[in-house]
Amino acid sequence: MPHAPANLTTALTPPVNAGELPQHILTPLAAVDDYLRDIVGKLDFPVNLRDAIAYALYGGGKRLRPLMAWWCAAAVSGRTDHDAGIKSLPAGAAVELVHAFSLVHDDLPAMDDDDLRRGRPTLHIATSEAMAILAGDAMLNLAYAHLAQVIDHPATLRSLVRELAQGTSGMIAGQVYDTLAGFEPGLSDEQKLRTIHINKTGALLRAACRMGAICQLSPSENLPALSAISHYADDIGLMFQIVDDIIDVTQPPEHAGKKTGKDIDAGKLTYPGVLGMDLSRKRVTELLDHALTSIAPLGPAAEPLAQIARYMAVRTK
């Protein structure tokens, strides 16, 4: 990364391994990271903006979304070799750019007001609020621009853009529900929680999974496989957020890599707060079981997705 300011350069770290996941599941991360670095390296942007984008993208994230896109592509192809998901790289990169944009903006003082992300200063602390806003805007735009640049098949491009737009819209709606309410009247607290999280977290995870599969399939091909991927994604999206809520009340900041307990302090709805810890953990188990059942018809090629789901159910950071 060229000419990064000292406060950015010293904080850059490669994506961390996702803990309990077997190494062969993590093999695609090197290709994903190289792909993202290539995208950023070619940007004709001001140096400080390019460096801010790099800081946000190379900040120790688990890369779960591009990893899931990769293995969803592999699952619908029926292949189990390490290159089975390589066609998913543009989709995975686009989703990761949107995810990084969302984290940068979520951390801003007007939103969640966080000064720590993945164990290091958030982007607006490391640079400025103005740069964080602009870097987030640039990453959101870059996600769509990159798809338009590298996807040649018009129908595939339309499908990918539609999925990413739906995932991004859901994520934004979820953040509104989480911070500014706007619910339809008459919803229970658990219904409100579900509405928040199937949008805020689940929508982009669903986009990652479906986009990875779409990269491997022709637009009208293998609809049952795409349906299986969709059900799997819906379940792990909600499960991911329930586990996040559990981490928020059970793990110290130095382990979680971010402030913990802040949702309860802010009076936000959380699954442990609404359902209690035991029932929250039961929901995780139920969603995991349903996710695994959904992808079982895809056979051995879906085993990496099963292992990712099992990891997500027990992660502690």
Image: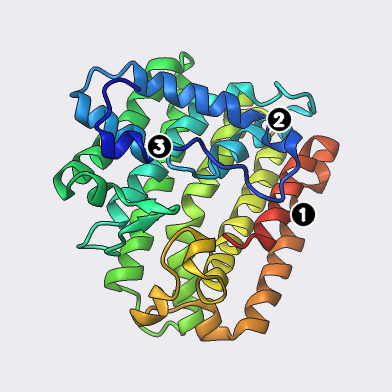
**How is this picture coloured?**
rainbow
- Mark 1 or 2, nearer chain start: 2
For the residues labelled 1 and 2, say whether their Cβ atoms are less than 8 Å apart: no
Would you name the residue on which mark 3 appears?
Answer: 12
Q: Position of residue 187 (x, y in %)?
A: 43, 82
Taking the spot 23% from the left edge, 50% from the top edge, the residue there is 124
Q: Is residue 31 left or right of residue 83?
A: left
Judging depth in this view, the residue of 304 and 182 nearest the camera is 304
Residue 219 can be seen in this image: no
Estimate how packed mark 1 is, as few (under 14), some (14 to 19) or many (20 or more) residues with alpha carbons within 10 Å: many
Q: Is residue 254 left or right of residue 309?
A: left
Residue 249 vertical position relative to residue 147 in the rendered view, above or below = below
Taking the spot 61% from the left edge, 63% from the top edge, the residue there is 316
Circle 2 — which element?
helix
Type of amino acid under label 3: Leu
Q: Nearer the viewer, mark 1 or mark 3?
A: 3
Quadrant in the picture for residue 285: bottom right
Taking the spot 25% from the left edge, 63% from the top edge, the residue there is 111
Type of amino acid under label 1: Leu
Q: Is residue 155 left or right of residue 115?
A: right
Q: Position of residue 64 (x, y in %)?
A: 57, 44
Q: Nearer the viewer, mark 3 or mark 2?
A: 3
Would you name the residue on which mark 2 appears?
Answer: 74
Judging depth in this view, the residue of 169 and 31 nearest the camera is 31
Type of amino acid under label 2: Ala
Total marks shown come to 3
Would you name the residue on which mark 1 appears?
Answer: 292
Residue 260 can be seen in this image: yes
Taking the spot 74% from the left edge, 37% from the top edge, the residue there is 23
Circle 1 — which element?
helix
Circle 3 — which element?
loop
For the residues labelled 1 and 3, say whether their Cβ atoms are less than 8 Å apart: no
